[in-house]
Image: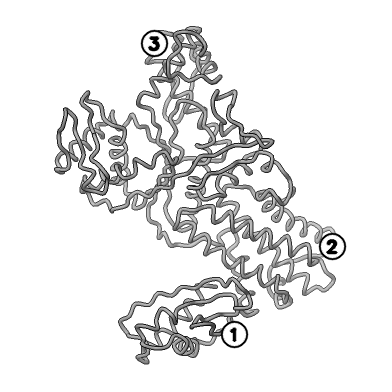
Amino acid sequence: MKPQIAELLSAAVVTLKDQDVIPATHEVRIQIDNTRDKAHGDLATNLALTLAKPAGKNPRELAQRLVDALPATPLIEKVEIAGPGFINFYLSQASTSHLVRAVLEAGADYGRNRSGAGKKVQVEFVSANPTGPLHIGHGRGAAVGDCLCRLLDANGWEVTSEFYYNDAGQQINNLALSVQSRCKGLTPDDEGWPENGYRGDYITDLAASYMNGDVVEAADQRYTGAKDADDLEAIRHFAVAYLRREQDLDLKAFAVDFDVYFLESSLYHEGKVNNTVERLIDSGYTYEDGGALWLKTTEFGDDKDRVMRKSDGGFTYFVPDVAYHLDKWQRGFERVVNEQGADHHSTITRVRAGLQALDVGIPQGWPDYVLHQMVTVMRGGEEVKISKRAGSYVTLRDLIDEVGRDATRYFLAARKADSQLTFDIDLAREQSSDNPVYYIQYAHARVRSIFRKLAESGLSWDSATGLAALEHLQLDSEKELIVKLGRFPEVVKAAGAANEPHQVANYLKDLAGDFHTYYNSEKTLVDDEGLRNARLTLAEAVRQVIANGLYLLGVSAPDVM
């Protein structure tokens, strides 16, 4: 209802400007908030307080003038002025009927908006090195990143999801050497094993696949094992493709898909890194010192200048990042969101500085970053640290196998990304109100169960009949449920603007809790036909909103539990 209240206040402001109560040129910003105490109404605004000074009036006096200028509407039962000049709105029965109707008529589209206006946004996430199975940190990035894509799409953006493969650099060399050692019969405990080699069982499987001459396909890559333990380059290509395929399978098990897979190596092969360096030199923001090429990042807020090209001729790691983001800009993405681990924090200033130094029209503060903190996995009160498959860390697949995809996705996305997360395996498997994802899904299944019981009793319901009977909903708990349903579009919009999918998770938990409390205290399938139809209509609206919210989190909405 906030948009409707804002429209009423806007009309009142126009009236008061016409009456010279408010300066005609003054720009007015209207903010509507939910009240904490329902004794003070359902919605409130501090508009009179913010306009009192430019209008030269006492806030309470101005509040009364605003209230008097409000257009007549059936949506508001009454309006009160409180404290120093707050305006409190009490919603009418007509407004609650309006909200329920809006949910049922929009269906799966309820909560969606066009604030993004079809503009292009790219979300880059996971972007793991193809050197091993995805760990739980990658899983958190996958959950948050995929939810961001869903949220931005719901806010009217044209979304492209992208995975950036770090398939160049020393870690790939270490991978190739590890697989080669396994091909030659060495184990991690043997002398001669690479100092920084990978030790998990997956290296053994990979080496066996290579020596068997297996064929692996990953996106645009297809390689056949050469069966030659001395051909390190062949091993390198096969290993990268093999692990890209394994990571793709992990992500598919997690219901995460990408529109674009971008290879870091392509930046070098296509000359984009060298081209970016030349453009930076031409911009005048570089200098030579000690045989190295430096970028004047201090000109753009960094605490010191940074080396771009080392004295040995190699580029530092942020240079291909700048080239990659220049490529993103050239592809027409007005907004870019990078979902990454907190260990990438130090690169933000450097990448943005490099992009500003290019002087190609990229806005300051572009791109956006969402950095997630580490995840601690617990079972039986003790931390779980090692996976047999990976050798030294808990994998995403481990968690999916333990607790299922839905619980894994919800738990990884349900907390603010920049806060540390403890993933309790025992809680995620629990079928009780203590497990939030179970609690939310159960609310959805519970509504489906109500309608099955209705059918079994030989009774029927349709939305038209139900909507016509909503005046029977007179309980405070019913009104509060409906008002909460009306908040869902605000939550979707706010979560999309702030890049915070956990807002949706928190909202769903609260909504499910309110519904369970209502269900346990009030019978739905009562004898009174009007009341029964009204309560069924409310239940169906709750179910629809829960389903819509779960979709944004990539979690299923089961009919039976």
Q: What is the three-letter code of the residue carrying label 2? A: Gly
Q: Earlier in the sequence, mark 1 or mark 3?
A: 1
Of residues 102 and 45, which is closer to you in this image?
45
Q: Residue 78 carries which label?
A: 1
In terms of sequence position, does the residue under pointer 2 or pointer 3 come before the other?
Answer: 3
Toward the bottom, the furthest residue is 19
Side of 532 where 254 appears, left or right: left
Which badge, 1 or 2, comes first in the chain's sequence?
1
Amino acid type at image mark 1 = Lys
Q: Are marks 2 and 3 in contact (CB under 8 Å)?
A: no
Query: Which residue is at 38% across, 20% downward?
Result: 173
Q: Going 66% across and 50% down the picture, which residue do you hit? A: 436
Q: Is mark 2 on a helix, strand or loop?
A: loop
For marks 1 and 2, give the CA distance.
42 Å
Pointer 2: what residue? Answer: 458
Q: Distance between the residues labelled 2 and 3?
A: 73 Å
Name the amino acid, label 3: Asp
CB atoms at circles 1 and 3 under 8 Å apart? Answer: no
Q: How busy is the neighbourhood of tag 1: few (under 14 within 10 Å), some, or many (20 plus)?
A: few
Secondary structure beneath disc 1?
strand
Q: Which residue matches tag 3?
A: 231
Residue 320: % across, % down: 30, 35
